[in-house]
Amino acid sequence: MWPWEHAIVAYLSYSLLCHTVFRDSPGGLDAFAVVFASVLPDLIDKPLAWTYGVFDVGYGIGHSIFFAVPLAIFVGTIARAADRPLAGLAFGVGYLSHPVADVVDSVFRQDALLIEIMLWPVSPVEGQPPGPDVLDVFFMLVGRYASTILAGELSTYLWIQVGLAGLAMLVWLLDGAPVLRECLRASARAVTAVLERDTASNQNDPNRR
């Protein structure tokens, strides 16, 4: 799956969890955590495979449940200790959704249940690395993806992806646009603080009286 597809699946899953369990929308920190964690396995495995040749393909330790589960527990423990339990939960949801989504994706794209994606080093995925550098391979694959869309050759699976992207955008807006919301609030507070400081400075300046 593409990074944005992982982000969409993870955010929709976490938003649904928040609304059903906590009766609230995701906050900015946990929304960032779930999206970042959802692409982290690829940020770990793709460079290790495509650039450094540690793995044959881009599914290694980052996708493995033997690494993902302990990492999710570790981050969750730290987040709870820092009084940010929802951020830890969001990280766990985002990270663990990634390998599961890749396995489900393999059924639709390759007509095979590649459960070994999640089982490194017990059952590593075999294959040939697609190229010598992670950025070169990424832009090459993105180019193919974009060419398919621009040519109007959208399969049923691609239409489903487009629909999920639209749904994710709608849900994000209904959630109050977390992350963007916090950034705008922080910017507003900063501007207000600067204006108040300038006002106070002008009032205390005898040359302006």
Image (spheres, rainbow, N blue to C red):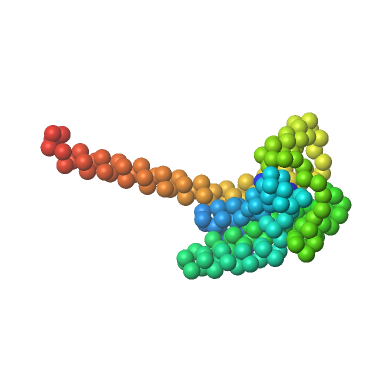
Q: Quarter of the image containing the C terminus?
A: top left
Residue 37 position (above or below residue 154): below
Quadrant of the image occupied by residue 73: bottom right
Q: Is residue 11 left or right of residue 179?
A: right
Task: Answer yes or no: is residue 141 visible.
Answer: yes
Residue 199 location (% of width, % of height): 24, 41
Location of residue 86 with respect to 108 vertically, above or below: below
Horizontal arrangement in the rendering, residue 6 relative to residue 117 (left or right): left
* Image coords of residue 81 (percent x, y): 48, 69
Nearest the eye: 54 or 134:
54
Residue at the image point whose x is 77% and y is 50% from the top: 56
Q: Name the residue at 52% across, 64% down.
A: 79
Asked if residue 58 is positioned above or below residue 201 in the image, the reply reads below
Residue 77 image point, x, y percent: 54, 68
Q: Position of residue 142 (x, y in %)?
A: 71, 37
User: In the picture, residue 101 is in which quadrant?
Assistant: bottom right
The residue shown at (59%, 52%) is 36
